[in-house]
Image: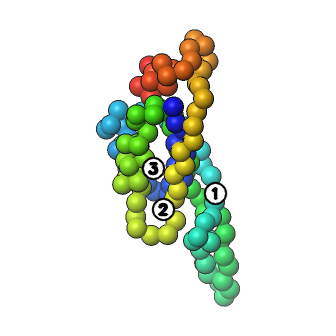
Amino acid sequence: MKKIEAIIREEKLESVKTALEEKGIAGMTLTRVSGRGRQKGILLQWRASDYRVDFLPKIKLEIVLSDDEYKDAVDIICKAAKTGKEGDGMIFVLPVETAFRVRTSDNGEICSKTIEGGK
């Protein structure tokens, strides 16, 4: 199993979520985060002075999928989240040793398949 952590622009959340749902990927966790990368924030003006906003609001999506499915999900996220400008985000893929469903204590690949299907 793999865990996808995708940091994307807030305004791209609906397009990413819709694109993933069209491919049958409904289970995900969303966290509102702030961050900075190469973009190094943005320069704003207020009254007569400039100031830099270093950490910009972003969305972090976390999705756990089987080893066979995660590459498609990464492609979908890349296409749906892309604006072509700095600050589009990052995607990290991490190994997951196992997963447990709290309600039933089911674990392993069976648990990840039912998690993504929303059952």
Q: How many marks?
A: 3
Q: Name the residue that disc number 1 marks.
A: 34
Which secondary structure, mark 1?
strand
Disc 1 or 2, which lies upstream in sequence? 1
Q: Is residue 1 above or below residue 100?
A: below
Residue 91: give its label: none
Q: Name the residue that disc number 3 marks.
A: 13
3 and 2 marks in contact (CB < 8 Å)? no
1 and 2 marks in contact (CB < 8 Å)? no
Q: Residue at x 37, y 47 (%)?
A: 76
Q: Which residue ends up furthest to the left in the rendered image?
A: 22
Classify 10 Å Cα crowding around label 2: few (below 14), some (14-19), many (20 and above): some
Is the C terminus in the top left, top right, bottom left or bottom right quadrant?
top left
Residue 62 appears in the picture as rendered: no
Residue 114 appears in the picture as rendered: yes
Classify 10 Å Cα crowding around label 3: few (below 14), some (14-19), many (20 and above): some
CA distance separating discs 3 and 2: 12 Å
| Residue 38 point in image, percent of width and height | 58, 70
Q: Residue at x 66, y 88 (%)?
A: 48
Which secondary structure, mark 2?
loop
1 and 3 marks in contact (CB < 8 Å)? no
- Amino acid type at circle 3 is Leu
Q: Is residue 49 above or below residue 67?
A: below
Q: Name the residue that disc number 2 marks.
A: 88
| Residue 11 point in image, percent of width and height | 45, 56
Disc 3 or 2, which lies upstream in sequence? 3
CA distance separating discs 1 and 2: 13 Å
CA distance separating discs 1 and 3: 15 Å
- Amino acid type at circle 1 is Ser
Which secondary structure, mark 3?
helix
- Amino acid type at circle 2 is Asp
